[in-house]
Image: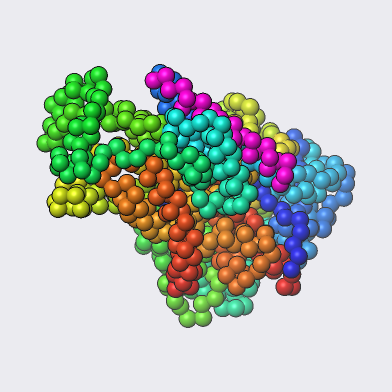
């Protein structure tokens, strides 16, 4: 049957969700304070990498316009993709290669996967994957060695052993938190966690400012600009695994993993909120999203272990993205079966 | 007053703001009325020639079949001409242009009180037909054919909905508050005219308050009266909802019920008890761009521009004028658009509240899937329609779609999913004919 001449009205005149353009704008604005902090910290090479990554995505946009006429009309998704790519690259990564990786990753995603809504893997994750293959030496390894953990007994202790510099106000802020807010819950945080929260020691900018990432994520979830199911499930699964079995292979102890250390030193907060939560790369039903979250949480644990690996989280996302088509196939069958049963 | 209406599925809410108190006033009579001759989808036959004078309530166009209802002049005057006018549903129709002059036959006269309880069902049906009563439960249709069909097929149910299916168009709820006795009496006479065995009254606690059961039983003698409390959710009160209710209340010889709304009940009451043809409508004027929101009793054919002026005019530059609710309504672009028999509300939007309409590619978020009350996959169905791949799943989804717009309301890409599905359904039906 050939159908021509659709008659479509602009109703409804009320919306309960922001547009994709607004979502991209909000996410970009929420990441701007990170750029400001990078400038304050005088990490100019990181800022240059970010700008060149954005330029790489812009170049893809121009190429797609010339080649395929596939244009993301008006919204600034390419800026966000470039920004995320730049933030995930180590500060010492060669700028020209940053541009190339960003261009190649976004071009591959747009050209092969199909771009907005059709991406199998997150374009920034693909770009960083290409960057890693191009120059793996600059990507940092684990912050702490297994031997150090075995010696000290916990991951954070091992980090402090390896000349970890505390922030200037770490002691006073930790003392203030312990005596006020945390005293109600009978919890005490030792010195050093405030530093990890405020400025974690990593060459990758995305891993550094955990406090900003957490606050911006809460704002984005509140504004309905971010999906919360997958981040919440994956963080919960990773935290549980980390707490229960992370130290078992090293010193045969259970239920003694350091969740905060794992979350604050692996870039997992940034990865789950800004990369993993991209709806293009996720299943569409709640059950499918929960399954993906569980798989991602397990992969985080496999790749990052007790914490301290800045790039493991990103490769976990790429692996999690690769199983999503299978989950989607199953969820479609389940959804159709449940519809017929109604 | 902020009204928050949750969706049937998904954790979404429709938030609408209305003034706490709304005045109900008679609108000024229009100096010129544009009375559309195509208010229910079918053309009518004009019976008054250009230049003739018409009396208030005089028949000016006769129905040409079961798909149209007679149209009467809402004001006395001279019929100047017939000319095309923009309609609230976005179409264009021929309208009789009547310039106000002469004396009034209905306004200012003593109200009649016809004892309908003592007349036959056929007589009530005849009066309803003569007065041009239409049913505005969903798409406007003449009331009488459905009553006749109900009598022929033995359908024994009448359903009255006492709340708005679109929570952003609050007229039905407001009428229930101010004119419940007329609504119930109008329903009672419709029930009598179709010889209904059972009368279902659907109300929701947030907006409607029913009289005592004994009072209701005296109004509907010999009829099974079922009061159904509906939750304050969206979508609720549409024909799909009513069919589900009937499934839960199986009765012998049950076919599709006659479903009416407060506007139709009031029209029937006015037609039979007061002997007034359909000449006016209560219309809710609201929106952030309007100075004084109000419910106006307007003559049919009054240009909405005149009525907006009566509400104080525009507070800010309007971005859209939406007729009959923000979810299911239509946007009009001409202030000369007349009030019709199916106009319930006029909402003036400002630039802050008007959503962005640029359509983007689907981002695969699955929100439409999570909120659909019919459990269909709206985006999957639209993809099928776009590819012209009408599989069994796509066809059944098109059939089951309630056209409620939940999917389009949550869509971050602003794809008008429900319209595409509805249009495809219409085209398939046309192709099958």
Q: Which residues are magenta?
A: A41-68
- Residue B250 lies, with reference to residue B337, above or below; the image says below
Q: Residue at 69% of width from left, 67% of height from top?
A: B428
Residue extending farthest to the bottom is B252
Would residue B290 be visible to someone looking at this image? no
Q: Which part of the image, by quadrant, shows the C terminus of chain B?
A: bottom right
User: Would residue B287 be counted in the magenta stretch?
Assistant: no
How many labels, in total?
Answer: 0
Would residue A287 be visible to someone looking at this image? yes
Determine whether, in the image, residue B394 is placed left or right of residue B199: right
User: Would residue A58 be counted in the magenta stretch?
Assistant: yes
Q: Residue at 49% of width from left, 54% of height from top?
A: B366
Image x and y of residue B106, in percent: 67, 46
Q: Residue at 57% of width from left, 27% of height from top?
A: B291
Which secondary structure is most common in the magenta stretch? Answer: helix
Image x and y of residue B298, in percent: 64, 41
């Amino acid at each position: 049957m050939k159908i021509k001449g659709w008659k479509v009205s602009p109703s409804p005149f009320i919306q309960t969700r922001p547009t994709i353009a607004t979502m991209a704008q909000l996410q970009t604005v929420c990441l701007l304070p990170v750029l400001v902090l990078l400038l304050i910290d005088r990490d100019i090479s990181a800022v240059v990498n970010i700008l060149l990554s954005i330029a790489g995505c812009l170049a893809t946009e121009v190429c797609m316009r010339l080649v395929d006429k596939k244009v993301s009309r008006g919204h600034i998704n390419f800026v966000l993709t470039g920004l995320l790519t730049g933030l995930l690259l180590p500060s010492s990564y060669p700028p020209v290669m940053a541009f190339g990786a960003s261009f190649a990753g976004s071009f591959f995603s747009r050209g092969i996967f199909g771009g907005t809504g059709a991406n199998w893997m997150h374009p920034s994750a693909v770009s960083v994957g290409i960057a890693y293959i191009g120059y793996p030496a600059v990507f940092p390894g684990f912050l702490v060695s297994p031997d150090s953990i075995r010696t000290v007994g916990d991951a954070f202790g091992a980090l402090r052993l390896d000349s970890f510099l505390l922030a200037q106000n770490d002691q006073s802020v930790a003392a203030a938190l312990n005596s006020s807010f945390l005293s109600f819950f009978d919890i005490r945080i030792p010195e050093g966690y405030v530093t990890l929260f405020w400025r974690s020691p990593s060459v990758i900018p995305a891993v550094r400012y955990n406090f900003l990432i957490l606050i911006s994520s809460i704002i984005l979830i509140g504004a309905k600009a971010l999906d919360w199911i997958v981040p919440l499930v994956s963080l919960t699964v990773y935290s549980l695994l980390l707490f229960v079995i992370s130290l078992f292979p090293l010193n045969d102890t259970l239920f003694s993993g350091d969740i905060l250390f794992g979350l604050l030193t692996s870039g997992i907060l940034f990865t789950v909120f800004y990369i993993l939560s991209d709806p293009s790369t996720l299943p569409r039903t709640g059950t499918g999203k929960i399954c993906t979250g569980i798989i991602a949480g397990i992969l985080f644990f496999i790749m990052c272990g007790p914490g301290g690996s800045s790039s493991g989280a990103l490769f976990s996302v790429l692996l999690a993205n690769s199983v999503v088509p299978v989950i989607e196939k199953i969820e479609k069958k389940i959804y159709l079966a449940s519809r017929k049963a109604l | 007053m902020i009204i928050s209406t949750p969706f049937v599925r998904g954790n979404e809410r429709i938030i609408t703001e209305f003034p706490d108190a709304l005045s109900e006033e008679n609108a000024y009579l229009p100096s010129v009325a544009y009375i559309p001759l195509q208010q229910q989808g079918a053309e009518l036959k004009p019976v008054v020639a250009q230049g003739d004078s018409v009396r208030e309530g005089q028949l000016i166009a006769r129905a040409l079949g079961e798909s149209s209802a007679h149209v009467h002049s809402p004001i006395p005057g001279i019929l100047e001409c017939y000319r095309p006018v923009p309609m609230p549903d976005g179409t264009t129709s021929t309208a009789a242009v009547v310039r106000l002059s002469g004396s009034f036959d209905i306004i200012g006269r003593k109200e009649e009180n016809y004892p309908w309880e003592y007349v036959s069902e056929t007589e009530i049906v005849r009066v309803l037909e003569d007065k041009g009563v239409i049913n505005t439960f969903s798409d406007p249709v003449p009331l009488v054919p459905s009553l006749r069909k109900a009598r022929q097929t033995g359908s024994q149910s009448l359903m009255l909905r006492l709340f708005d299916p679109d929570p952003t168009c609050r007229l039905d709820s407001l009428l229930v508050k101010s004119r419940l006795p007329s609504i119930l009496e109008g329903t009672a006479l419709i029930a009598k005219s179709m010889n209904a065995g059972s009368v279902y009254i659907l109300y929701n606690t947030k907006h409607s308050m029913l009289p005592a059961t004994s009072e209701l039983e005296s109004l509907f003698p010999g009829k099974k009266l079922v009061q159904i409390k509906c939750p304050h959710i969206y979508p609720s009160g549409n024909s799909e909802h009513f069919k589900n209710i009937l499934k839960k209340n199986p009765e012998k010889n049950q076919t599709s019920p006659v479903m009416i709304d407060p506007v139709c009940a009031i029209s029937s009451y006015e037609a039979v008890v007061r002997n007034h043809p359909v000449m006016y409508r209560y219309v809710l004027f609201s929106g952030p761009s309007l100075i004084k929101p109000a419910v106006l009793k307007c003559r049919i054919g009054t240009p909405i521009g005149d009525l907006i002026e009566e509400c104080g005019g525009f507070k800010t530059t309007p971005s859209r004028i939406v007729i009959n609710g923000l979810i299911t309504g239509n946007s009009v672009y001409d202030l000369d658009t007349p009030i019709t028999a199916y106009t319930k509300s006029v909402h003036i939007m400002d630039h802050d509240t008007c959503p962005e309409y640029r359509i983007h590619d689907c981002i695969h978020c699955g929100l439409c899937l999570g909120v659909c009350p019919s459990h269909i996959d709206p985006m999957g169905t639209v993809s099928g329609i776009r590819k012209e791949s009408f599989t069994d799943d796509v066809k059944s989804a098109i059939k089951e779609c309630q056209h409620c717009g939940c999917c389009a309301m949550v869509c971050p890409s602003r794809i008008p999913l429900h319209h595409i599905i509805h249009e495809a359904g219409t085209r398939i039906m046309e192709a099958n004919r």
